[in-house]
Every structure is written in structure tokens, then in C-alpha cells.
Image: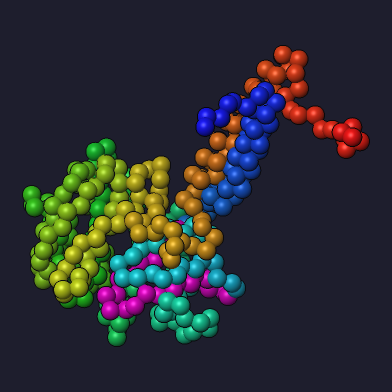
Amino acid sequence: MTRSPLPGRGRARAVLLAALAALGLGLAGAPGAQAAPDDGWARVAHLSPDTAGVDVRLSGLAGGGVLHRLDGVSYGQVSGYLPLPAGTYVVSMVPAGADEGTTPVVTQTLTVEPGKPLTVAAYGRNSALTTTVYSDDLTSPPDGQARVRVVQASTRAGSVDVSTTTGVAIARGATTGAATAYATVPAGAWDLALGGDASGTARVDLAGGSVSTLLVLDDAAGRQTVKPVLDAAGPAATPQQGVDTGGGGLAPADRAATPGTEGAVGLGLGLGLVGVLVAVVAAARARGRSPLPVARSRAGRR
């Protein structure tokens, strides 16, 4: 069955309700999406091949409640960047699903500075689990270029080289736990070759203007593999959510968004619909009709 268009009053009422709903969503999303000028960012990476999934808690060094909770983080996963006011924090990891008060498997302090992104990583074998903090540089590359670095997290290859099959070197002699300097390469699809103590190939697609980290990991067969993580898609989206940070276990408890995007979109949509509402109301008044239904008293309907 085809439904006929709403009459004038019904249409105006529907537009009003839609506009108010959209405006409410936009205003509700704005505070959580904005970052203060002195905020920095931090994210968490699980890079230990024989360590089961972990729950991550980030809290202030001076005590207080947990600021961010990341549940069920498994090997090779990297969270999105979490906006944090400048200061010192503690990142703790416990076995996934552990009770409150469980002794952390590892803890790591980090100092967040304004405008500076950091990556906190746990790597190595479970018997000698190690944590470290990497300083990320999300400076945008020139047009048509991409910036990329390597984080060597393989526990089976002591030293790793990464280069393109055309001979462009991205990493030379990267040792376990090391993050290399960033290399600038032409954007596009690249076939990579692993060398040094590692062997194998991988294919990555680097978008123009992007900044990425290539994780060298151990696969189930004991060989090495490369997993790309998008750090920043471009200068307007810095920092960018990690590749594996969709909903679910890696989502922060407060769902903090990349600064300035979610709230701006919602607010723009709401204001746009309000503009449509104003036009509908003006047109209805010009025709001498009330744009909204007139309330009737109960006595008047008897």
C-alpha cells in the first residue's frame, strides 16, 4: 500500500518533531566530542603473542576513579586514541573478565602533554611481559605521500628489516620492542618484504596524506606477519581511530570521539532541520493557516 503525503498540519508537526529530535542529538553529542586545547591522546596496543585477552584500565596517577575502560583487548589489537588532559596517568592490564581488585598483569605510567599522541604497548612473551610508551608523530606528509613506521613486536625474530619490493627501505635492524622513525613513501598499494631474522611478504595500501604504523607480529605458525594500523587519515582527522577499534570490547566506556567531528555533524543536522521548520511555518502563515495543530480541551470534544 502506498501512503499518501501528510496534510499541511501533519507535515508541519512531523518536521517540528524531527528538527527538535535532531537538534537534541546534536547538542548532546557536542560536549563529549570536543577536546580542550591542553589535551593530549593515548592509545593501548596488545602485542604479546602468548598473553590472553586483557582488560585495560586508565586512571590518574594521584588516584581516583577509572577514566577509560577497554575490555577484551586481544593480541594484535590497538585501541583508538583516548583524549586526556595533560598530566600523568597509570595504565593497568588484568586478565579479561577478571574481578575488580585483581592484581594487574602489568602497569605502566605515562605523561600526557598537550597535543601529543602516545601509544602504550605490552609486548614480549608472557613470562617476561614488558610495557613501553611510544611517542607518535602524526605530522601530515606532502600531497600524494604517506608516512609510515614499523613497531617490531615479533618475539621470534630478533632483528627485522622491512622494505618495499621495489627497494624502498622502511626499517633496518629493528629489534623487538623498537619503534622506527617514520619514512615517507608515495601513497598507494605496496608489496613489502621482511628481512633480517624475519622472512615473508605483506601487502599494504597507504592512502595519500595518511600516517600509519606497521606492526611486525608472530603468526600461529611461528612466522612473521605485518599488520597495518591507521594512525591518522589526514590533517583534518588527527588523531585517527585505530583499525581494530570499532565497537565492542575496545570501545572506551565513555565513547569519547575524535575531537570536533561527532558533535559538529549532529549540530549541523539539527540546525539544518530547524531551518526547514522555519520555512514551513512561514509558508503556512502566508496561507493564513496555523502550522501546528490547535489543542482542544476535553470539554470542547464532548
**Where in the figure is residue 100, as x and y percent of width and height?**
53, 81
Q: Residue at x 51, y 56 (%)?
A: 256
Predominant SS along the magenta part? strand
In the picture, measured across the screen, residue 279 lies left or right of residue 39, that is right
In the picture, measured across the screen, residue 179 lies left or right of residue 272, that is left
- Residue at the far left in the pictured view: 166
**Where in the figure is residue 266, as x and y percent of width and height?**
55, 41
In the image, residue 14 sits, relative to residue 34, either above or below, namely: above
Q: Residue at x 21, y 76 (%)?
A: 155
Q: Quadrant of residue 74?
A: bottom left
**Where in the figure is residue 128, as x and y percent of width and height?**
29, 84
Q: Quadrant of residue 289?
A: top right
- Residue at the far top in the pictured view: 287
Q: Residue at x 63, y 41 (%)?
A: 21
Q: Is residue 290 magenta?
A: no
Q: Residue at x 80, y 29 (%)?
A: 294
Magenta segment boundaries in residue numbering: 41-63
Q: Can I make out residue 89 in this image?
A: no
**Residue sitting nearer the eye, 9 or 184:** 9
Q: Is residue 61 magenta?
A: yes
In the picture, measured across the screen, residue 105 lies left or right of residue 294, that is left
